[in-house]
Amino acid sequence: MMANRTVRDDVRDILGMRTRAAWLVSGLFAVAISSMAFAADDGIRDIRFTALAVLLILGAGSAMLLAPGDPLPARFAAPAAVAAPLAAVLAISQLPVPMANSTQIWFLGAGSAYLNFLCVRGAPLWAWTGVLGQIVVSTWWTTHTGQGWRTGVGFSFINLTPLLMATFFARVVRPLAHSILALRQQDTDRAAAEAAAQAAQQERDERVARLGSAARPLLEIIASGRPLTAREQNECRLVESELRDDILGGLMIDASVGAAARCARQRGVAVVLDDGGGLDEVDADLRQLVRTVLRDALDYADGGTITARILPPGRGTLASILLRDNGELRIEVEASGAVRSDLDGRQDVREAKQDPRPAG
């Protein structure tokens, strides 16, 4: 059975974007961006717009570490891309003309930084959209403030270079990352399969050892030519039934179920076990639940026949146990882990017969 991963691996695992070091770097980035934004406040008309721009960029940057999916789904990539030009609108609208210093366009470099990682996360078109949006905002502002459109293009166009490098880097790294992740998953699946095979072999060895300890004395008596006593003949029948259970019962059988089946047969109960394979693909807890229900049913039976079947994989019902002895009792274990029987319904009927008063 394949190992189930609770967290899906993606390129973040290869680049270490889920590690403490990544969050440390992200924290340093947040400190640096905040320091530049609030230190270069000469001539800023309303610092609150700057603070909002900082929050937008830091939020989009955190999404590069937290957002699931590979490649990054559009529902996460699109807001991250829009955050860069939107932060540029908020911050640039409060700048003096001319600017006091070049640090006041901190938002262009900050936005470009996380947009580079947007390429690595498999959304290069959204990353380029974000950078081009920054260029449009900068050019519009310098044009409408009399600084000329070339000025806006000049101090924002430079961010295309690192984004171009990030695009080519992603084209090379992402296929390699997927190959590494596939190999890692193959190793995990192979280890799980080997562990399952080893556990199954160990269980088979235990069954052979139990049957050997029970059958060897009887085989020695048969080989000696001495007639079997009535007790020994009954023991032969029990051993034969246990061997049939091990062959047909499959994963239903463990030491406790085997012992309960032997005791039931000694009380005169005919026991039939049939494993259709449904237990092969369930977890250990559900498998143990089926064994517990079967063991309780075997302990409950005093006579008649008990037939336990494991249904094939993919059914809503995992196990069905039928007891026949002056009537029928069916017990079913669902794939969800619920246990149902018609015993409750019978109890309701008996209570209604004992209390004939009308309801209400």
Image (cartoon, rainbow, N blue to C red):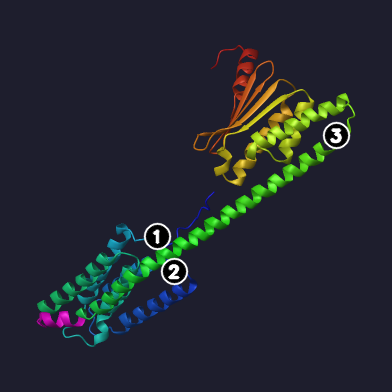
Q: Between marks 2 and 1, how big is the CA–CA gap? A: 15 Å
Mark 3 → mark 1, Cα distance in angstroms: 68 Å
Q: Which residues are magenta?
A: 145-155
Q: Identify the image quadrant of residue 195.
A: bottom right
Mark 1 burial class by Cα count in 10 Å: few <14, some 14-19, many 20+: some
Distance of mark 2 from mark 3, alpha carbons? 65 Å
Q: Which residue is mark 2?
A: 14
- Which residue is disc 1 drawn over? 68
Residue at the (76%, 27%) spot, across then down: 265
Q: Amino acid at mark 2?
A: Ile
Q: Nearer the viewer, residue 130 or 349?
A: 130
Q: Amino acid at mark 1?
A: Pro
Residue hosting label 3 = 223
Question: Do residues under tags 3 and 1 come within 8 Å of each other at their CB atoms?
Answer: no
For discs 2 and 1, the disc positioned in front in the rendered view: 2
Picture residue at 57% right of the left edge, 42% below the top: 280
Mark 2 burial class by Cα count in 10 Å: few <14, some 14-19, many 20+: some
> Going 32% across and 60% down the picture, which residue do you hit?
76
Could you tell me residue 151's position as x and y percent?
14, 83
Which picture quadrant has residue 169?
A: bottom left
User: In the rendered structure, are the residues bearing label 2 and label 1 in contact, judged by CB atoms less than 8 Å apart?
Assistant: no
Q: Earlier in the sequence, mark 3 or mark 1?
A: 1
